[in-house]
Amino acid sequence: MTDIQTVLDEMKSAHEAMKTYVDRKFDEEKRSVEAPETKDAIEKISAKIDELSEQYSELRKVSQRPSFDFASIEENEKTALQLRAFEKFVRYGSGENGLSRMNEAERRALSSLNDSEGGIFVPVDFSREIIKKANDAAEIRPVSYVAQTGRDRVHVGAIANPTVAWGSNNVAVSAQDLATGGEYIDIHDLRALILIHNNTLDDSDADVFGEIGMLFPGAIAEAEDDAFAVGTGAGQPQGILSNAGVQGNKQAIGSDSLIDSMIKAFYKLKKQYRRNATWAFNSTTESLLRRQKDAVDGQYLWQPPVAAGEPATLLGRPVINPEGIPDKDTNVLYGVVGDFRSGFWVKDRSGVTIQRLTERYAEYDQTGLLVKRRVGGQVVLAEAFVPLEG
């Protein structure tokens, strides 16, 4: 906690310095005076805040992560056999060379992990750990509704405000609501290719699990965030900003100031969504928003975390940074505010599989490990989001 508090204190100090120089810039503009050193100072401080924000985000995720020690997994017979068999598969494969290094019990354990598509299921405990790390690195998933499924396509019933009535009056559902039906969440394959040098695989002291656990989570988290934000829906989830219903709620800047447009976007949400709302912009756009002041009383809308473990806020609501969202530009949806947990659902299909690719990378003396995870994501309640258009 000492490290996270140190970074937080530095971020607050940098923010105060930023406000000083931005105030100076506003004053210079009123006097029609341009001072390059003021602009340079703002850019340098903004870059420093970017760096500190990234450090703070990582430390915050680590501090909130449930403890998990792979070495402390209960060594029951089934788990131990699967882990040993899986490690030997990763190092040597399941061909004659690989099987010759396994005893009969390990061969049976590996057989129990076989996937019908030619891969090997990652043992549950290790799979849980790498998924946990991937979730820690993600932006949209932690604030959305997440659940498991055993299907390739999930039907989500129509989600709308409940129909209510007093006393003995009948509670009726309109024909329009009945006809609307719901949403279908398709489950897609998300693949990540990891290349490991054969010398590492042959080295019995090398931490193969560590290699996989270090490289895979960050890659899938980035791919998920991009798809959940702006995905096309073809072979991948449809992103929030790509959803036609969400686009119909957009708040354009038009003749308003950026601040006024953001305030209008926030209050365009219904009250039940505002109280749980989160802002989503990429880091570049957020750096611009740090300089914005309320024209009424001159207060800055972006505020650093008030305490260690808390997020930065904008209009009092937390900010996340899915980097796949476009930079602020004319006629571009560059951000969104909304209740992600109510409006966006993520469905995970159990099981992470891995395939070894040996021949393809043989000339480089490397082995490819193709890791596959199955996941879907879908806007289920468009009215929970209001995007901003530049």
Image (cartoon, grey):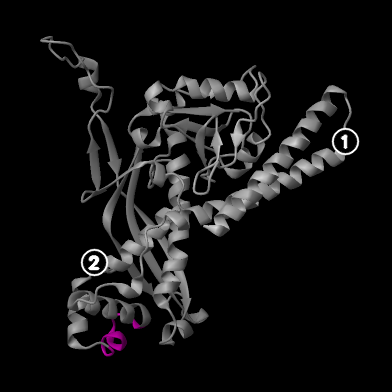
Q: Is residue 28 above or below residue 64?
A: above
Whole-percent x and y of residue 6? 61, 55
- At x 55%, y 41%, the residue is 306
Q: Which one is nearer the viewer's eye here, 47 or 59?
A: 59
Label 1's element?
loop
Label ID, residue 35: 1
Whole-percent x and y of residue 19? 72, 36
Q: Residues within 10 Å of mark 2 (few under 14, many from 20)?
A: some
**Which portion, as a residue range, is magenta?**
92-101
- At x 21%, y 82%, the residue is 107
Whole-percent x and y of residue 302? 60, 34
Label 2's element?
loop
Q: Viewer-nearest of labels 1 and 2?
A: 1
Q: CA distance from mark 1 to mark 2?
A: 65 Å
- At x 53%, y 51%, the residue is 57
Q: Is residue 237 above or below residue 267?
A: below
Q: Is residue 50 visible?
A: no
Q: Is residue 134 above or below residue 182?
A: below
- At x 42%, y 28%, the residue is 275
Give amino acid for label 2. Asp
Whole-percent x and y of residue 299? 65, 27
Q: Is residue 61 above or below residue 312?
A: below
Does residue 311 show up magenta in the picture?
A: no
